[in-house]
Image (tube, grey):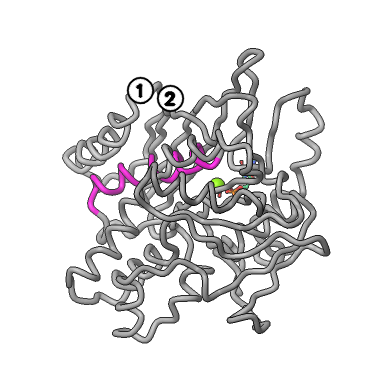
Amino acid sequence: MDLKDIGEFGFINRFANKFNSFIKKDEIGIGDDCAVIPINESYNYVITTDLLNEDIHFLKNKISPEELGYKSLAVNLSDLAAMGAEPKFSFLSIGIPNHISVEYLDAFISGFYKLSEKYKMPLMGGDTTKSSDKLIINVTVIGQCEKTEMHLRSMAKEGDLICVTGFLGDSAGGLKVLLNNLEPSPNNKYLVQKHHTPEPRIQEGMWLAKQKTVHAMMDISDGIASDLIHILNASNKSAIIHTEKLPISEALLKGSTENNWNPIELACSGGEDYELLFTVSAKNIDKLKKEYTAQFSENISVVGEIKIGETGINWLKNGVEITNNKNGFNHFSNK
Ligand code: ADP
Ligand code: MG
């Protein structure tokens, strides 16, 4: 059997239950954005790790070493944001091929430090080894959150509204700019910047976690088409998504018009937006939206609704069902 036949999640599902069977009360293992380990009666540690491989996750001649250092930490912090956690500690392991200079590594660390400094987050350890010819980066982060403020993927309820922060698809637009060597216009530069230096939604995650009306929460790393399925699987629900309500930035619209991209497709399946995806009880949505905007001077977008029924997403455009064959990014899948 080839890995592409089952995909990354098919592989993980082959062993997750076996190990999860050792998990003790109040611990959470494989399956959410972070693992959860109780600290005491009031607090949990939440822990996550991400691997970035040269040519798979980044193109070394397109991203600066500072940006790469920053992004390596940012993508991990996004998983802490998804748990509403406060960042506490990080670990960094690097496999370094011969041709990487010390100056390159210094610049990488300075990008990593820049984001660490924002959260006063010490780098607590890691590992440094040689690699054959590609740069390999693994970051682990530990955060802390209150036990009463846990928002797991399994917590979506029937009738909840599905919400997202920020805009979707900009990062995928940025990747297209890079891959197609498009001119560095201000618009294209903005999209590339969203791709190279995503801002993890730490403050927003911590704020949303405190709201009792917020139920399930996760971050969007692979695209809403794939990531929402994780919430639906864990919560045993289905969903409708109104594609015309997906938040698309002016920059992505402009890029799409100029280059003949499909902005909805990029918003659904592009991935690497690192926005938050969460569900909210419908009767509280107006209050939540107002308070969020007052707090962060940005809007929450309501893009769909949680329904009962077999796990899956019904895609609508102005109320009419459409087919969306695009799934999110899945390593190993050849679709
Ligand atoms: P995220 O995109 O939020 O980082 P993933 O989709 O990569 O999460 O992973 C889904 C879940 O599977 C997470 O709980 C993650 O810790 C777990 N997981 C992924 N790969 C492995 C692995 N090789 N061994 C154990 N758990 C894994
Ligand atoms: Mg995640």
Q: Label 2 belongs to which residue?
A: 89
Which SS does the magenta portion mostly show? helix
The one nearer the camera, 59 or 132, is 59
**Magenta residues, as a range?**
64-82
- Identify residue type, mark 1: Pro
Report which residue position mark 1 lands on. Answer: 122
Q: Which mark is residue 245?
A: none
The foreground one among 71 and 100 is 71
Query: If you read the primary sequence from the N terminus, does the residue marked by circle 2 or circle 1 appear first?
Result: 2
Answer few, some or many: residues within 10 Å of disc 1's Cα (few below 14, many 20 plus, some between 14 and 19): some
Residue positioned 43% across, 67% down in the render: 169
- Residue nearest the viewer, comparing 292 with 273: 292
At numbered mark 2, what does the secondary structure look like: helix, strand or loop?
Answer: strand
- Quadrant location of the N terminus? bottom right
Q: Position of residue 85 (x, y in %)?
A: 51, 31
Above/below status of 99 relative to 167:
above
Q: Is 108 part of what is drawn in magenta?
A: no
Single out the residue that lies furthest toward the top: 40
Seen in the image, is 314 located left or right of residue 139?
right
Image quadrant in which the C terminus is located: bottom right
Residue 252 drawn at (x, y percent): 35, 72
Q: Position of residue 107 (x, y in %)?
A: 20, 40
Residue drawn at 50 percent across, 60 percent down: 301
Relative height, residue 24 to residue 236 (above, below): above
Q: Residue 202, position in %: x, y?
A: 43, 38
Q: How far is disc 2 from disc 1 in space, using C-alphas?
A: 5 Å
The secondary element bearing badge 1 is classed as loop
Tag 2 and tag 1, C-beta contact below 8 Å: yes
**Dot 2 alpha-carbon crowd within 10 angstroms: few under 14, some 14 to 19, many 20 or more:** some
